[in-house]
Amino acid sequence: MAIRRIAVLGGGPGGLYAARLLKLADPRREIDVYEQGEPGKTFGFGVGLASRTQRNLADADPDTIAEIVAAAHGHGVEMRVGSRTARINPANLLAIARTSLLDVLRRHAEAAGVRVHFGGRKTAADLDADLLIAADGVSSATREAAAADFGATIEVGAGLYLWCGTDFALPTAMFAPLTTEHGTFVTHAYPYAPDRSTFLIETDEKTWRNAGFDDSTEQTPWDASDEVSIGYLQEAFAEYLRGHHLIGNRTRWLRFRTVRCRSWHHGRTVLLGDAAHTAHYSIGSGTKLAMEDSIALTQALNLDGDLPDLLGHYERQRRPGVAHLQSIAHRSQLWWESFPTRTDLPVEQLTVAYMTRAGKVPVDRFRQASPQVATAALVQYAQVPAADVPAGDVDDWVLSRPLAHGGRRFGSRVLAADDPLLPRLVRLEYNLADAWGAEADALAQRAARDRHDGAAGFLLTGADARDSVLNRLEFAERLRLLTGALVVVEAATEYRADVVAGLVSGRVDLAAVPSTAAPNM
């Protein structure tokens, strides 16, 4: 079947980019994009583009990415806790105004011969096409109209966030917690133009309710901004705003929704971007995923075959990468939702905890990119002079550091199989994916009772897989914070880099190898 007429529902980055790439691949195709909004009007402020995303877009369409980069704003990153700051410099990190990005993508789509229609709401039933691409966002009406066919599940996060902007360019991207009388708020802020920055702020439900934002959210119309919250946060973050105002754009408190679908296609319809899947904003993934979906869909439709086969090929090729990114994003989301528990860490150690939070960046790799911050964190971890930190690989060094805890001294951070303390530890088998969820709550409360009754510490065991080890390290951090007891995580030698990150970040006290292994990792 020749795919000649293509309709795209949604004129966001994914929809416009898919339309252009599909038209470039075969100019005979008739492609129409239907966007219910008007040009230049969009929800949001800036969009981040990491270096790998830029490379992927350059391989697919060098002309478009060149104009995007020309309109973008480069920046570094810093973690700020009170007066303490740690600065890192990720390679080639850019951000661009969402309005500018959409303008570039629209013009390039139209230059390729795509017809873009604004205003008016269209549905799949309204459109006569060989292929319908539903790029209509996280609340996709197309997906919901055929819910049984796509099999979507939506997981709602525990934390709350709202998007603001401000009318000046921060000198760098910034993560900064701020504690008020009502609780702790954290900003994720970054510049995206010479005179603009995104200023996202998140908090937990208790703080949100304490500040009265449950009421202000309820009283804010869906198409308006929560001016009560904006005014409060503008005053709270005045030092960071440097006298500037927070700007709203349909700004209201939200809970992040993670979308997963059993199938991304049915009949002539295929889901793309947030309509098919979402991943937490803390890894800057929404636009990335949508545009990379567009690349994969174009590649699949350039093959020979019937439409169902081609769409199945697209999904098989694309789904593993999306699932991996969603896994990373889930860990990042949980880390940010529990962020206020870590603000007692020295800022350099906190930065290492941030960089290693999802198991994506090991300590050694981070040290290569930001040696000053990483070395300071290693000094704080080991309580030694900077001169004692080795210049090369530090994994062995981290594991070999002694530990004093509860009147005992351990010769290294790997608990020996014959250590007399081992039988006295409360053994907890842990196989949960959310260290802060309801099931983990019950386990943590049980551990707190054990500690009150005199438990010397805890040994977390579980499945011998990397995800399970990362899960144990996350729960270990919670137990350390809750009980103050010694917490040991069992992990095979092949996961030593994850254990090293957990040790330096304050997630765990000691590691234990499976009982059949040697004492040293």
Image (cartoon, rainbow, N blue to C red):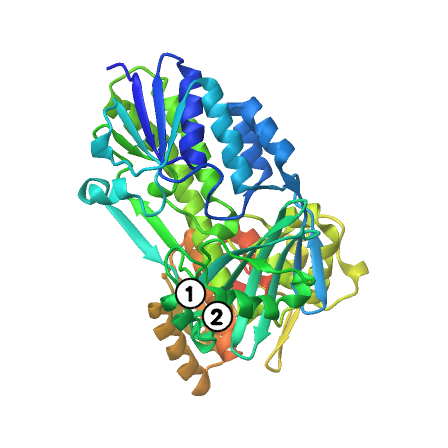
Residue furthest left in the image: 148
Q: Residue furthest top?
A: 28
Could you tell which of marks 2 and 1 lies nearer the N-terminus?
A: 1
Q: Which image quadrant: the N terminus? A: top left
Q: CA distance from mark 2 to mark 1?
A: 7 Å
Q: Where 164 falls versus 314 (above or below)?
A: below
Left or right: 237, with 299 as reference point: right
- Residue projecting furthest to the right: 387
Compared to residue 425, the image places residue 175 above or below, namely: above
* Residue nearest the viewer, comparing 210 with 450: 210
The dot on residue 478 is 2
Is there a contact, CB below 8 Å, between mark 2 and mark 1? yes
User: Which quarter shows the C terminus?
Assistant: bottom right
Residue 435 disc label: 1
Query: For this view, does 420 lie left or right of residue 32?
Result: right
Q: Give neighbour class at mark 2: few <14, some 14-19, many 20+ (Cα, 10 Å).
A: many
Q: Where is residue 444 shown, x and y percent of the image?
A: 40, 74
